[in-house]
């Protein structure tokens, strides 16, 4: 276990953060806002530290073993989270350390829960910084899930990573080429989303900020009203479309956009079905409640379902006022999340698919104990190790939720707040339920301990739980 | 698939129900209560039908195939549920069909949720009948889980069924001898509990009714106040002791009582630890809330934890008023339940143990992908089929909860009521949370549809979910 070996790439990531900080610095400079200097100073500090690490340990870059891989995964997200928190502490928003860390983690993990209010009156620099954190976090998790998680055999990710034969080991050896292509496609998607939002009436600044938090399924907005600021059904549908793409496996979207395949990937088809069923269910629940469902209300339902399921978390209506059956669906969608290999969080559609296949297999085996039939996920065979990994992931995911809920009730929160805040954090969605963490609430009123607990929950969820839980294995630290 | 083959044992079960109905008939006769005739008529009807089935199809009793086994499991519980509902419909309590079915299912599945109020003013016959339903349901599920579930390879039950070498196939061939021994031990336990309750101040009638619902982890009481009627800390501790035994694997208790082994079975040790941790957690939560915890309060906490975890559901204090952290623990204990092979319901301690072992295995394999180390549960090896079964059970258990919650919100219940009623039903506990289904609430105010949904939930939970879900497999009905 050589920490020096991971220092250089961590330094490189900090340099990326430093360069990103220059953008808000420029925007604030153009508006003659004094935060400009803060961003510049943060950039210099982060870039200086990053540069020293990158150049100082450059020679140490040699193949990692698994331990080093896991330490890199954890260290990179924590380092970026601290760097991301820097501007929040020193700029005009003047946050406490816990608030700044929470806001930064919520950004990088593309969760989108916020402790800030009065967003509409904030300087553009800090708003852009929040959007950039999500944008970087989004592409970061795609790159990790394409290259690093399969290499680490993290919670069965090798099963879901890539479907084509053009995979894992080969992809890793051609890291730079692939990473650049992913980055280019991610940029293109962001550009398309920006232009669409702009064409539909958003200001260019709002358009680019919301585009960055749409394609990353993040959900930070430039307004306390979130998407309701724009009062526009076309914007809702445009946002729904791009959120859906962001919740789909990124490599599939990449191949579709470059014309190499059609959109009907098995995970995407399931996601479409789940969205359709959830929408129908909510419409039925509203009709049973004697509410009228016109086109604008229907658009809002579709938008909300896709926003929650893709773990984006943009708000439009206060769905806390919807029928209880709608809330039950939204809670389940919060748990489920989008597709693996996407920027979305949560349990993931792919895992649900394998779980259902496992149920079918187990039921059939109760009838025909000697029948041999292999389990399939798409064209891959699900072997017993995959089942073990999936089971462990499911158990650890649920235990994380249970422990986080217990911890949050112990600090004095009510059960609804504790449970839904935990689920929304671990699934990287954003809003929970109830007056505090619900869609019109704000996480600011939670205590510092709560913010730390939820920040850890967001990181655990983002990094597929097991990559952080492994540090609790005593054997990780010996021999 | 020959339905005739299962008709005879179903008839035998109905005869058992018929004989049981004679007891309330006698009690009511002694009190000159007119329900006496009702119970006698019900006994004749049930016994007549049972007798015809038993004698008419006696010759058809030959070895079952798996399909016939599953049909028997379902048919036996439904038949007994209908028979059990009969006295509720025609006696003075004069219930609707849905209420009577709910009360009967809640009894036989040892859940203990009730739609009756004013219990203290009811005739003794109907109170005894409720206790008898739980007592019969309790010994019924022990017999099923010892003989039938392992034979059907139901959701991995063969792993948990028996630890000794003296098992499954052999036990099945010596069914009568084993069943009689189980029945004798169950009767002895009930007698011990009755005498203890009686010695500590309960009337003999209250003692025998509560003993029957204690050793079956059922939780029906003869009073609306449940255990609070007796205002006695010694009774709380006696009840805690017997509930704990009821939540432990029955065969282990049997061997301990007959002096053939010590109590420290691996599941029992885990259950003790979980109880201890839960109690400490609740005490800490109360102290953080500035509440004083004296011995009487401490006794009440231990009693409540054991009552919920063993899925008995006796009430003492309104724990709805406890700190939110205590409610979170109670919710988790409701989900978990007691040991497999006991009268308790829920997910089961044994499954939690295997899940945790799976997590450890999966984490270790991320570090050492090529290390081979077999998974153990006690002295048995957990193979990949066991893992598959456990995963399927876990998924179906959670899906049952999700579907039941969605259905209950759709009929107009709030999310808390829908979720906690579903969990308490599927885990066969009894009380949920909130004003309606909470510890001081009553299920009577729910709609008929809700009562049917919850009755099905109770039966699904009681029969290990998969034994009923298998009927949804199209292939069950072909070839």
Image (cartoon, coloured by chain):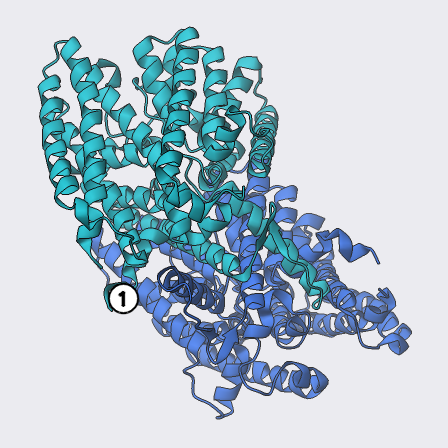
Chain colours: A blue, B cyan
Mark 1 secondary-structure assignment = helix
Q: In the shown orientation, is residue B11 left or right of residue B38?
A: right
The residue lying furthest to the bottom in this view is A259
Tell me where residue B137 appears, x and y as whole percent: 31, 34
Looking at this view, is A446 or A31 the one in front? A446
Residue B274 falls in which quadrant of the image? top right
Looking at this view, is A138 or B26 the one in front? B26
Q: Is residue B350 above or below residue A107?
A: above
Looking at this view, is B216 or B151 the one in front? B151
Task: Give the residue displayed 60% in from the left and 87% down from the top.
Answer: A166
Looking at the image, how many numbered discs can be counted on the residues? 1
Task: Give the residue displayed 74% in from the left and 62% down from the top.
Answer: A83
Q: In the shown orientation, is residue B38 left or right of residue A257?
A: left
Residue A42 falls in which quadrant of the image? bottom right
Tell me where residue A73 appears, x and y as whole percent: 71, 66
Q: Is residue A367 above or below residue B226?
A: below
Tell me where residue B323 appears, x and y as whole percent: 51, 29
Q: Is residue A245 above or below residue B471?
A: below
Q: Is residue A23 above or below residue B16?
A: below
The C terminus of chain A - image quarter: bottom right
Looking at this view, is B393 or A182 the one in front? B393
Task: Give the residue displayed 27% in from the left and 29% down from the top.
Answer: B133
Tell me where residue B148 appears, x and y as whole percent: 36, 46
Task: Give the residue displayed 38% in from the left and 58% down from the top.
Answer: A317
The N terminus of chain A - image quarter: bottom right
Q: Which residue is mark 1?
A: B474
- One can see residue A113 in this view: no
Category of crowding for the residue at label 1, using alpha-carbon neighbours closer than 10 angstroms: few (below 14), some (14–19), many (at least 20): few
Q: In the shown orientation, is residue B267 left or right of residue A432?
A: right
Q: Chain of mark 1?
A: B
- One can see residue B133 in this view: yes
């Amino acid at each position: 276990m050589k920490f020096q070996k991971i220092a250089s790439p961590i330094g490189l990531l900090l340099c990326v953060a430093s360069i990103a900080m220059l953008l808000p610095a420029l925007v604030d400079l153009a508006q003659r806002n004094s935060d400009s200097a803060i961003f510049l100073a943060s950039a210099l500090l982060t870039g200086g530290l990053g540069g020293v690490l990158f150049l100082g340990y450059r020679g140490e870059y040699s193949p990692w073993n698994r331990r080093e891989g896991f330490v890199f995964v954890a260290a990179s997200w924590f380092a970026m989270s601290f760097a991301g928190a820097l501007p929040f502490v020193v700029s005009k928003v003047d946050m406490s350390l816990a608030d700044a860390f929470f806001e930064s983690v919520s950004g990088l993990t593309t969760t989108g829960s916020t402790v800030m209010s009065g967003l509409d009156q904030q300087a553009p620099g800090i708003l852009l910084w929040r959007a950039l954190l999500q944008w970087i976090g989004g592409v970061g998790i795609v790159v990790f899930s394409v290259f690093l998680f399969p290499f680490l055999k993290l919670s069965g990710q090798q099963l879901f990573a890539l479907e084509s034969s053009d995979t894992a080991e080969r992809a890793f050896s051609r890291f730079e080429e692939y990473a650049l292509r992913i980055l280019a496609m991610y940029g293109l998607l962001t550009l398309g989303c920006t232009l669409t939002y702009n064409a539909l009436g958003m200001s260019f600044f709002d358009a680019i900020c919301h585009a960055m938090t749409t394609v990353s399924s993040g959900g930070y907005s430039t307004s306390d009203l979130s998407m309701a600021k724009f009062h526009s059904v076309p914007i809702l549908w445009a946002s729904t479309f791009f959120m859906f793409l962001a919740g789909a496996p990124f490599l599939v979207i990449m191949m579709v956009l470059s014309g190499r395949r059609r959109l009907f990937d098995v995970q995407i088809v399931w996601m479409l079905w789940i969205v359709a069923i959830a929408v129908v269910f909510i419409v039925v629940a509203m009709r049973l409640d004697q509410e009228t469902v016109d086109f604008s209300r229907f658009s809002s339902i579709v938008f909300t379902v896709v926003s929650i399921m893709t773990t984006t978390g943009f708000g439009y209506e206060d769905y806390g006022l919807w029928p209880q059956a709608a809330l039950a669906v939204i809670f389940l969608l919060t748990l489920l999340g989008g597709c693996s290999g996407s920027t979305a969080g949560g349990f993931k559609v792919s895992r649900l698919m394998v779980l259902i296949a496992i149920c079918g297999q187990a039921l059939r085996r109760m009838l025909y104990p000697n029948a041999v039939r292999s389990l399939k996920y798409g064209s891959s065979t699900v072997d017993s190790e995959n089942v073990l990994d999936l089971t462990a992931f499911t158990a650890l995911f649920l235990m994380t939720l249970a422990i986080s809920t217990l911890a949050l009730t112990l600090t004095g929160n009510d059960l609804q707040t504790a449970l839904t805040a935990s689920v929304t954090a671990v699934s990287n969605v954003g809003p929970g339920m109830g007056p505090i963490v619900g869609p019109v609430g704000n996480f600011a009123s939670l205590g510092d301990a709560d913010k730390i607990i939820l920040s850890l929950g967001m990181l655990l969820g983002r990094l597929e739980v097991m990559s952080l839980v492994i540090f609790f294995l005593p054997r990780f630290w010996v021999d």
